[in-house]
Image (cartoon, rainbow, N blue to C red):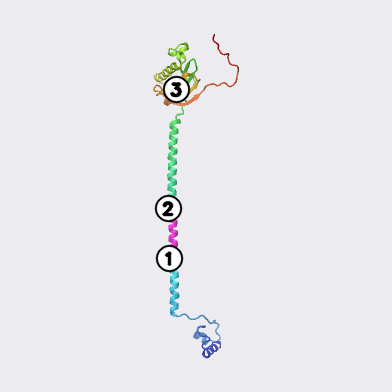
Amino acid sequence: MRARLWNTVEQTMPWIGRGSRQPLSQIEARSPFSTVSPSYAPPDSARDSAVRRQRETDVLRSSQSANTESSSSNSSGVADILRMMQKDRQVAGQKSATYADGLRKRQEETYQAYGNRAPPYNLHVYAHKHNTIITLTRPNGNPLMSLGCGNIGFRKSHRSGYDPAYQLSSHVFAQIQEKGLLHEIKGITLVLRGFGMGREAFIKVLLGNEGRNVRPLVTRVTDNTTIKFGGTRSRHVRRLG
């Protein structure tokens, strides 16, 4: 009924429904009690449909290309990250290897310096203003030799001085080598006592040609000079004349 009325109105006044309503189908026109809601969308021409489909195709292609570019950029970014991580691992491995090599080298040097745990022998040098006495002892303190300037021919006041101490030091080093103690001794602790001229003479001989065989065995140098701080009253000073 409504369809017939609308058709009559359109036939009478065609400008009312022109371009604002889609023509009804035959089923809608024939069925007066149809529940299908009429569509008021304007009809699309073939050109508009082609343009719309072209736009949809362009949008789809652009989205696909964007997805491809994003995926490629993401893959390239991931590849760059993996490459950087691998490079960091290589650098870290090189650093750890370098550190390990340096540590191993230091350990070897330390072992070469302190690898021999045999207790060292002791070489005591007692230098005072009247005489110089050199004593070689075992690690437990038992003496192997003890020589003074009097043992090499200097008497009384001639035992003091630089030259007697120099000759005594050369004689002691020669005795150590002649008795074959260099093979037995693995290390020597040098113990200095006193500030006489024999102290400087002994050091001079040790650093010279006479001490070339004993010098590599010295592992430690100590000073055992006693220094008085207060204490009991000293002996009276000797007065001559």
Instruction: Give the number of the disc on residue 83.
Output: 2
The location of residue 198, given as percent across then percent down, is 46, 19
Which residue is found at the position 44% from the left and 57% from the top?
77
Q: Residue furthest front?
A: 241
Tell me, yes or no, if residue 55 can be seen here. Answer: yes
Label pair 2/3, CB-CB below 8 angstroms: no
**Residue 13 sits above or below residue 178 on the image:** below
Label at residue 65: 1
Precedes in sequence: disc 2 or disc 1: 1
Identify residue for label 3. Answer: 203
Up-down: is 232 above or below 53?
above
- The mark found on residue 171 in the picture is none
Q: Mark 3 or mark 1: which comes first in sequence?
A: 1
Name the kind of residue labelled 3 in the image.
Ile
Tag 1, which secondary structure? Answer: helix
Crowding around mark 2 (Cα neighbors within 10 Å: few <14, some 14 to 19, many 20+) is few
Earlier residue among tags 2 and 3: 2
